[in-house]
Amino acid sequence: MIDVLYFAWLRERIGARSEQIETNAATVADLVEELKTRSEAHALAFSDMASVRVAIDQDLTEMT
């Protein structure tokens, strides 16, 4: 189980500050693909990844 925190326009589009996700994703990119399937709001929020930044344990990381 992991905690996913959303900020700024991702939070607005998804309509939540955070979610607890049960996942087997091996990479951040895999997790994003799973998140896109959760709802239309998730799919829209993650449709353009150009402005999305990702951090793991408060350290910025790449999508792979």
Image: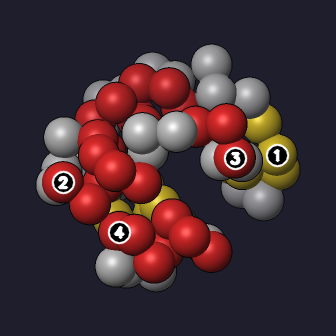
Crowding around mark 2 (Cα neighbors within 10 Å: few <14, some 14 to 19, many 20+) is few
Residue at numbered disc 2: 40
Identify the mark nearer the N-term, 4 or 3. 4
Residue 40 visible within the image: yes
Residue at numbered disc 3: 51
Residue 18 visible within the image: no
Q: Is residue 17 left or right of residue 53?
A: left
Q: Image point 64% across, 28% down: which residue?
A: 63
Identify the mark nearer the N-term, 1 or 3. 3
Q: In this view, does 19 lie above or below 29?
A: below
Residue at numbered disc 1: 60
Identify the mark nearer the N-term, 1 or 2. 2
Badge 2 element: helix
Q: How far apart are marks 2 and 4 (CA)?
A: 9 Å
Task: Between label 1 and label 3, give the one nearer the viewer.
Answer: 3
Whether tag 2 and tag 3 are in contact, CB under 8 A, the answer is no
Q: Distance between the residues labelled 1 and 3?
A: 13 Å
Q: In this view, does 50 lie to the left or right of 25?
A: right
Residue 10 x %, y %: 51, 65
Residue type (three-letter) at the residue carrying disc 3: Ser
Residue at numbered disc 4: 14
Q: Is residue 25 above or below residue 47?
A: above
Residue type (three-letter) at the residue carrying disc 4: Ile
Identify the mark nearer the N-term, 2 or 4. 4
